[in-house]
Image (cartoon, rainbow, N blue to C red):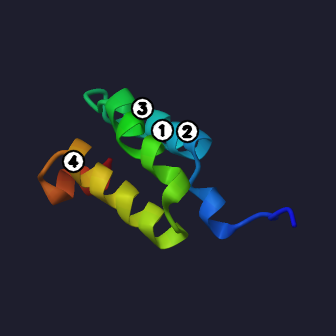
Amino acid sequence: MKEGFQLRDVFNKNNVTLFAKEVSKNFPDFKENDFINYITPKLSELSWLDRSKLITEALEKYLPKDFEKAATI
């Protein structure tokens, strides 16, 4: 039986790429390609929650360490 839409599919390569481009508009030093390449190879095996955690982990890695600055981005 063919699977239909799954909530985890919201966090897909296309949306991660679009998100990275938006972050880059507000933070020119953002390593957009590194962010995308950190996330996308792992997506297919992960649930929605695990994808969400992975994106959060990547944001912590690629945004400024100062929370207030990162939050404004």
Name the residue located 29 percent from the left edge and 33 percent from the top edge: 30
Numbered circles on residues, count: 4
The answer to whether marks 1 and 3 mark residues whose Cβ atoms lie closer than 8 Å is yes
Locate residue 31: give its quadrant: top left
Tag nearer the camera, 3 or 4? 4
**Mark 3 or mark 4, earlier in chain:** 3
Instruction: Report whether residue 63 is seen.
Output: no
Q: Which residue is mark 1?
A: 22
Q: Secondary structure at mark 4?
A: helix
Alpha-carbon span between mark 1 and mark 4: 17 Å
Q: Residue furthest bottom?
A: 49
Of the image marks 1 and 4, the number of the one nearer the N terminus: 1
In the image, what residue type sits under mark 1?
Glu
Residue wearing tag 3: 25
Name the residue located 30 percent from the left edge and 51 percent from the top edge: 59
* Image location of residue 57, percent across then percent down: 28, 57
Nearest the viewer among 3 and 30 is: 3
> Residue 73's mark?
none
- C-alpha gap between disc 1 and disc 3: 5 Å
Residue nearest the observer in this picture, 22 or 4: 4
Q: Amino acid at mark 2?
A: Leu
Q: Is residue 10 above or below residue 34?
A: below
Q: Which residue is mark 4?
A: 61
Of residues 5 and 71, the one drawn nearer to the viewer in this rendering: 5
Image quadrant in which the N terminus is located: bottom right
Q: Please say if the residues under marks 2 and 1 sit with CB atoms less than 8 Å apart.
A: yes
Mark in front: 2 vs 1: 2
Q: Gap between marks 2 and 3, in whole Å?
A: 11 Å
Amino acid type of the residue that numbered disc 3 sits on in the rendered structure: Lys
- Looking at the image, residue 66 sits to the left or right of residue 16; the answer is left
- The residue sitting at the front extreme is 1
Q: Which residue is mark 2?
A: 18
